[in-house]
Image: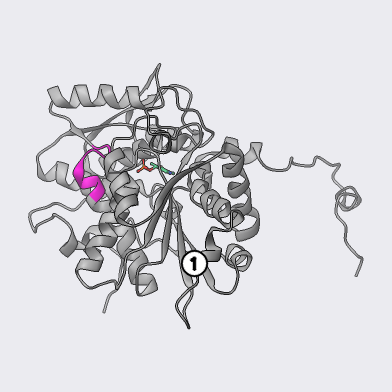
Amino acid sequence: MAKMWRGIIEQYRDYLPVTSATPVVSLCEGNTPLVPARQLSAELGPQYEVFLKYEGLNPTGSFKDRGMTMAVSKAVEDGATAIMCASTGNTSASAAAYAASAGLECIVIIPQGNIALGKMAQALMHGAKVFAVDGNFDDALRIVREITNNYPITLVNSVNPFRLDGQKSGAYEICDALGDAPDFHFIPVGNAGNITAYWRGYVEYHKHGKAARRPRMMGFQAAGAAPIVRKQVVPKPETIATAIRIGNPASWKFAEDARDDSNGMIDMVTDAEIIEAYQFLARREGVFCEPASAASVAGLIKLMKSGFFKHEAPAPGSKVRIVCVLTGHGLKDPDNAIKHSAEVISVPASADAVLEHVALARR
Ligand SMILES: *Cc1c(COP(=O)(O)O)cnc(C)c1O
């Protein structure tokens, strides 16, 4: 039997609001690997298993594709000819690609000067009309809402409910891969759509008997953009992790529900902690994600250091399973990658010149 992966709508059709009349617009998103994190697991101890849900391996390099296949398919079903979004980068990259595939016009509004280079390249390359506004993400979203309320353009930010429906598929895949939900689910929190979607996914899978339990949802904001943790809107959010540089999350209330219903937490990590996790993942685990994605692992490391897991003994014969979502690919943000790595060493074109810089024994 042919086993070609055809994207999350075909894979999870029974769990999604689609019918045979829905024209499926897919780039074969989803089916991303759950990579065992050897070093993190070793540091936690033999009773723990850490996995990285590597969402950077989606077609446009972030989890946004899971939601976009749904939002764009439903927009086409609805007769739309154009879509629009505000974006810290990845939503626009995804919207532009899916719009291209569906033959729709795509308009994106980004905050001036705060978009990672790779994301900008994607939106432009896929033919979107890109506007940079003199404001932050929250300003951009306000403008998009105003325009889409008054003109026949479909809004594809995560306030579009189909986006969250599609993003639930991440939770389904994790349960399918592990045979059950993990004990803990670590995730970066920006506009808070993804933590909402994952929790809904876990709850639904549990309800359908596809998972025996539900994880504790562990969300992490950047300290300079942590409205949920601080319990107030942050008017000028600041963080190196531009994908979570959001001061007034659209799904704020839903994220609090996910935290409370799952006996989880929403905490924050500093930019220094984010960069440390970003480097650790690349250098020790071999997995390259963008800075915002590393917030999940920064949160895990923060809790490890505080002794949080000492109180989390597994059931006899089993292990405590921890999944960290790595939301986007490291190549999205080459500037930060280079800035936080060692410098290239320039040498004359000889073996001796190279060997001066490496400690090797001659064979
Ligand atoms: C969008 C995004 C986030 C934040 O997700 P929310 O649903 O807005 O909380 C985190 N990381 C990356 C890479 C993203 O693109």
Q: Is residue 108 visible?
A: yes
* Region in magenta: 156-164
Identified by mark 1, the residue type is Glu
Up/down of 3 relative to 75, above or below: below
Which residue is most to the bottom? 317
Q: According to the image, label 1 marks what residue?
A: 312
Tell which of 89 and 124 is nearer to you: 89
| Horizontal side, residue 143 vs residue 38: left or right | left
Element assignment for label 1: loop
Magenta-span inclusion, residue 69 = no
Query: Which residue is at 15% across, 46% downward?
Result: 74
Up/down of 142 relative to 100, above or below: above
Query: Which residue is at 8% across, 59% downward?
Result: 20
Say which quadrant the C terminus sits in: bottom right
| Horizontal side, residue 26 vs residue 32: left or right | left
Query: Which residue is at 73% across, 43% downward?
Result: 342
Tell which of 61 and 363 is nearer to you: 61
- Quick one: label 1, few (<14), some, or many (20+) residues within 10 Å? few
Q: Looking at the rendering, which quadrant does residue 53 occupy?
A: bottom left
Say which quadrant the N terminus sits in: bottom left
Query: Which residue is at 49% across, 67% downward?
Result: 312
Question: Cβ(mark 1) to ligand 1 < 8 Å?
Answer: no
Ligand 1 quadrant? top left
